[in-house]
Image (cartoon, grey):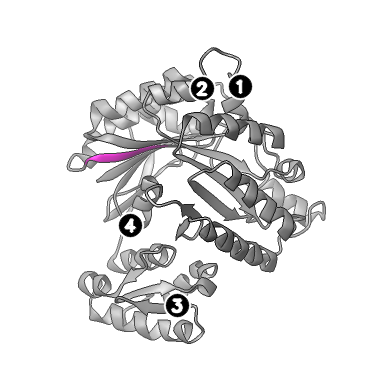
Amino acid sequence: MAGIYIHIPFCKQACHYCDFHFSTSLKKKEELIQCLANELELRKNELQNQTIETIYFGGGTPSLLTIDELLFLINTVYENFKVVENPEITLEANPDDLLAVRAQSRTIFENYKDIGINRLSIGIQSFFERDLKLMNRAHNSKEALECLTLATQHFDNISIDLIYGIPGLSNDEWIENIETALSFKVLHISCYALTVEPKTALETFIKKGIIDAVDDDLAQEQFNILVDKLEASGFVNYELSNFGKPNYFSKNNSAYWQGKPYLGIGPSAHSYSGDQRRWNVSNNTKYIKAIQKNELPSESETLSETDKFNEYIMTGLRTIWGISLEKVKDDFGENYKKQLLQQSEIYIKEHLLYIEDDKLLTTKKGKFLSDGIASNLFKINLS
């Protein structure tokens, strides 16, 4: 099984914290969508031995596309790849886009369902107006609430994004954000700590003292609150940032963490075959010019055994599936397993990691620190 990720590199405006590739100009949207379809055709042989089980529209802001544009891309996938009977088709969407056509006789949600989209990932981020303005989101708190009221009438498979660690966001307000989300009975919630990425507006504002610096200790407190609240409500924290009710984990994202192959289509999109990584140029104009010449505007790298091991450590520790010690031995050899166990000893003693059923897993205390722990468990050189 494999997945296809389609990057839609357009946004109405730039969020202050975002360092993803996008453009706020829609002038080349029609041209670029045709190129996305062309890239799917050019690369149809890359997954010829795989069946597609997930199609994911990410961005950027995929909800800026019309129904016809989305259907065109979905049909192109079906024309060029073998797709399972009921694939998970996810659309990332912003609340303001989902409300833009609510006056029409048919809601946008009904139209999405008609073309096969069966999962929505809605970028709420916060229900507080102050936070939304700080992040320069295109929607307001009222639209966030209205959007979820409508969306939950038409979709059951809905994920919402929330951000914690926002300067000025108290623990009580964070709890209110979580409880508001739970009141809509959504079945999946993705939560991320606000990070200060280089060359973003957020970084500039913090350096100038316009916005307070991000407090890592407060972010960890709010993560722990999040885990307690959601697990008490029946959610499973199946990956560091992702919480789902049983049977509602993201199939697309789970495939990434479990090492399944996927094809990334569009500017800046990444692909993974198991042995190789490929990434497209992060420039809309260069991407369009290359595709129009039937050329792939990408670079690639072949992964070494150590690269594969390190990636398995990173992804495994973030999930409930953990790191299989048997898999490490079978796939990489006894030396890798021996070194992994030796390096893990200090974290086991500090109750950050534990071993159960021959799997290395993070404790509740170690979960928030899993990325840092994983990097210290990487194998740099066998000798």
Kind of residue at badge 4: Gln
Q: Which residue is mark 3?
A: 353
- Measure the C-alpha gap from mark 2 to mark 1: 9 Å
**Nearer-N-terminus badge (3/1):** 1
Is 295 covered by the magenta stretch?
A: no
Q: Nearer the viewer, mark 1 or mark 4?
A: 1
Q: In the figure, is residue 122 to the left or right of 273? A: right
**Nearer-N-terminus badge (1/4):** 1
Q: Secondary structure at mark 2?
A: helix
Pinpoint residue 23: horizontal percent, then vertical percent.
57, 32
Local crowd size for mark 1, using a 10 Å CA cut-off: few (<14), some (14–19), many (≥20): few
Kind of residue at badge 3: Leu
What's the residue at 41%, 65% (across, down)?
Answer: 314
Q: Which residue is mark 1?
A: 100
Magenta part of the chain: 51-56
Pinpoint residue 294: horizontal percent, then vertical percent.
31, 28
